[in-house]
Amino acid sequence: MDIESLRDVCLSLPSATEDVKWGNDLCFSVGGKMFCVCGLEPPLMITIKVPDDEFDELCSSPDIRMADYVGRYKWVTVEKESRFSNAEWKRRIMQSYELIAAKLPKQLRENL
């Protein structure tokens, strides 16, 4: 997965937006809440939210670590974009999106 493919996947999700935060991180959000973050400088590292029951297993996998600052909320950073196939990336990004969207206020969720 390259950065353009990542953008395509993220922006294909309902009401997804993108912006640059902290000067060098491309952030994808839904309802103002981030669901995917990646650095703009190589190597491409992607940070996503994962289900609670997958967090420990993923963090013990090669090329995946607990995300800085938000790891306690079950976010992981994948240090090599080749760690997952494109299909698996799509699934994981959609999963992150759904986890974040599910926590949005009801009225906002209904408008997505």
Image (cartoon, grey):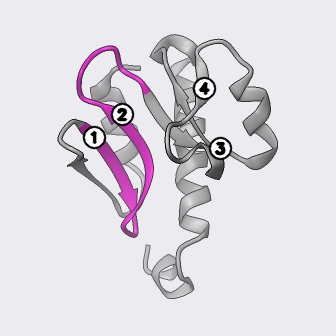
The residue under label 4 is 65
Return the residue found at the far left. 23
Q: Which of the two labelled residues, at mark 4 and mark 1, occupies the earlier sequence position?
A: 1
Mark 2 vs 1: CB contact within 8 A: yes
Q: Which residues are magenta?
A: 25-45
List x then y, in percent, for residue 18. Answer: 26, 51
Image disc number at residue 38: 2
Q: Which of the two labelled residues, at mark 4 and mark 3, occupies the earlier sequence position?
A: 3
Toward the viewer: 90 or 63? 63
Q: Is residue 34 above or below residue 91?
A: below
Mark 3 surroundings within 10 Å by alpha-carbon count, few (fewer than 14), some (14 through 19), many (20 or more):
many
Mark 4 vs 3: CB contact within 8 A: no
Res. 31 image quadrant: bottom left
List x then y, in percent, for residue 66. Answer: 61, 33
Mark 2 vs 4: CB contact within 8 A: no
The residue under label 1 is 26
User: Circle 3 — which element?
Assistant: loop
User: Circle 1 — which element?
Assistant: strand
